[in-house]
Image: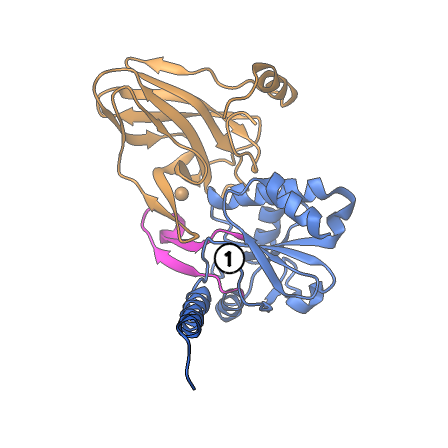
């Protein structure tokens, strides 16, 4: 088969495009906890945790509603309250549509956070926010499923001698359980609200 | 962020408190001081302010003390690759003619081992120690647990 120069160039261009696509897909898979809003391959985060009354709560229990998920810990006085107060503004802004969105606060601090501790924390921001926690294994499984990073870091200058590094974005899960997008830390509540209202 | 004076005033009045006046001592001025209500007293609180250096020599914030906390510390939140972390900061510089701003998501006073819960609407004294400027005590107004600035 003889190829014209134009055909060769087309083949070369498509080969390049394929390589570029493969590279993109590969780096996309490494974006755990990343800040970008680039499209990710569809996935369905799963978790099996407990609420403040120690009742089991699973991801399947929220089918049919959107979930707005934040990972944090209750000994976090700076970043976590900022984000949860944004969630509160979003929930207030949704008005009559608020029941179609379930905000979840998933603790990555299984050592300290459980039961009443969680409820006391989440209810300080908005009554609709559901606090969840679990065993170290269940917590690990939940974060892996959401592809988010967290780590317990020893720090003499922190309460109890340690602090938690954690992904600081909000994650939106759709009514069928699919991961839809993240809202980066610091995104104004009005922008998050507008995006949600477009979907409802 | 600049807000119209009337809006700020309306907020201050409706919320039942008035924003703290700037405190000037020597070349230093402390402004926009506020703290977040703590959730119980077993969890740490956070406090924020701006230090302006009106002099022509740099100064450093080196110490903190307050009757409400047995362990107040200067912390900095860093965000990298979407991951937030807090780290202790030994001292922070206020350049000559410049300012040091403590705000959510950045530098903050971490009030650990609270001796009393920080309740919305209350105030408490916070003493800042500067290398050159000495000690300055500021009365910190406590805003709600979800407050994000000194005047929202
Ligand atoms: Cu801190």
Q: Position of residue B10 (x, y in %)?
A: 63, 18
Q: Secondary structure at mark 1?
A: loop
Residue nearest the observer in this picture, A8 or A94? A8
Relative vertical location of residue A13 with respect to residue A72 in this rendering, above or below: below
Q: Which residue in the structure is indicated by mark 1?
A: A38
At 55% from the left and 21% from the top, the residue drawn is B3
Check residue A66 for magenta coloring: no
Residue furthest to the right: A96
Q: Is B71 located above or below residue A156 in the figure?
A: above
Q: Position of residue B90 (x, y in %)?
A: 26, 38
Colour of chain B as rendered: orange
Q: Quadrant of ligand 1?
A: top left
Q: Quick check: B57 left or right of B147?
A: left
The residue range painted magenta reads: A146-170
Q: Position of residue A65 (x, y in %)?
A: 72, 59
Q: Is mark 1 within 8 Å of ligand 1?
A: no
- The answer to whether B125 is drawn above or below residue A52 in the figure is above
Residue at image position (45%, 25%) is B33
Q: Quadrant of residue B59?
A: top left
User: Quarter of the image containing the N terminus of chain A?
Assistant: bottom left
Chain letter, blue in picture = A
Of all chains, the one bearing label 1 is: A
**Residue under the point 42% across and 38% down:** B111
**Is residue B14 rendered to the left or right of residue A109?**
right
Query: Is residue A146 at least partly visible in the picture?
Result: yes
Q: Residues within 10 Å of mark 1 (few under 14, many from 20)?
A: few
* Image colouring: by chain
In the image, A14: left or right of A176? left
| Left or right: B125, with A61 as reference point | left
């Amino acid at each position: 088969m003889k190829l014209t120069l134009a055909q060769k160039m087309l083949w070369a261009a498509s080969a390049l495009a394929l390589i570029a696509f493969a590279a993109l897909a590969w780096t996309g898979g490494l974006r755990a906890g990343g800040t970008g809003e680039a499209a990710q391959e569809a996935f369905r985060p799963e978790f099996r945790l407990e609420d403040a009354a120690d009742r089991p709560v699973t991801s399947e229990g929220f089918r049919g509603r959107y979930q707005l998920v934040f990972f944090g810990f209750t000994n976090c006085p700076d970043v976590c309250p900022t984000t949860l107060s944004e969630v509160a503004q979003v929930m207030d802004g949704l008005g009559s549509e608020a029941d179609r969105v379930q905000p979840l606060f998933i603790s990555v601090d299984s050592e300290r956070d459980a039961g009443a501790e969680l409820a006391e924390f989440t209810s300080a921001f908005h009554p609709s926010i559901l606090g969840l926690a679990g065993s170290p294994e269940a917590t690990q499984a939940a974060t892996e499923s959401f592809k988010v990073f967290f780590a317990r870091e020893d720090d003499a200058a922190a309460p109890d001698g340690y602090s938690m590094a954690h992904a600081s974005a909000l994650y939106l899960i759709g009514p069928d359980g699919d991961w839809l997008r993240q809202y980066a830390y610091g995104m104004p509540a009005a922008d998050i609200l507008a995006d949600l209202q477009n979907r409802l | 962020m600049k807000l119209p004076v009337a809006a700020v005033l309306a907020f201050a009045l409706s919320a039942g408190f008035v924003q703290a006046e700037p405190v000037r001592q020597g070349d230093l001025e402390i402004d926009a001081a506020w703290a977040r209500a703590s959730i119980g007293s077993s969890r740490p609180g956070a406090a924020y302010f701006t230090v302006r250096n009106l002099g022509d020599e740099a100064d450093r914030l080196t110490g903190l003390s307050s009757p409400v906390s047995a362990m107040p510390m200067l912390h900095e939140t860093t965000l990298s690759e979407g991951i937030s972390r807090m780290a202790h900061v030994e001292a922070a510089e206020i350049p000559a003619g410049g300012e040091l701003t403590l705000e959510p998501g950045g530098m903050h006073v971490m009030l650990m081992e609270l001796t009393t819960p920080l309740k919305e609407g209350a105030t408490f004294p916070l003493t800042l120690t500067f290398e050159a400027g000495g000690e300055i005590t500021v009365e910190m107004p406590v805003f709600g647990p979800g407050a994000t600035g000194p005047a929202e």
